[in-house]
Amino acid sequence: MKNSSHDRLFGYKFAEIYLLYVQKAERKHRTKEEVDQIIVWLTGYDQAGLQQQIQKGSDLSTFFAHAPFMNPKRTLIKGVVCGVRVEEIEDPLLQNIRYLDKLIDELAQGKALDKILRQ
């Protein structure tokens, strides 16, 4: 059974979500560059590809569908986002979105970038 709130989430513009990620990071004295580094690590986009997705107005579904590769270390990301354990999410797209949310949360919490990137 499809979840309409998930469908709505998948349709959000990545550029809008990206702006929220950057604002959240900057409020916690982190940088846009760190947000970009996390997104590049997770999705395989290079900086130009990331900017292109933002400028094209891609939704989250398209953004993740066109990702060059999803980092295999993303399965090491554990924890709770929006009351749900990310490692238990069955929908692959929703799980990838929540992985990114979790990484940005860790950045905002002051975690070291090498720990966030599971290095």
Image: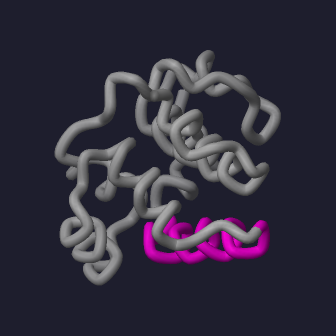
Is 87 positioned to the left or the right of 44 in the image? right
| Residue interval drawn in magenta | 12-28
Q: Is residue 13 above or below residue 38?
A: below
Residue at the (70%, 49%) spot, across then down: 105
Magenta span: chief secondary structure: helix
Residue at the (45%, 75%) spot, across then down: 15
The structure's colour scheme is one colour
Q: Is residue 4 visible?
A: no
Residue 46 in percent (x, y) is at: 22, 59
Q: Is residue 22 above or below residue 42?
A: below
Is 104 positioned to the left or the right of 96 in the image? right
Farthest residue, direction bottom: 55
Residue at the (75%, 30%) spot, across then down: 80
Residue 40 in percent (x, y) is at: 34, 53
Determine the image quadrant of residue 81: top right
Q: Is residue 63 visible?
A: yes
- The quadrant the C terminus occupies is top left
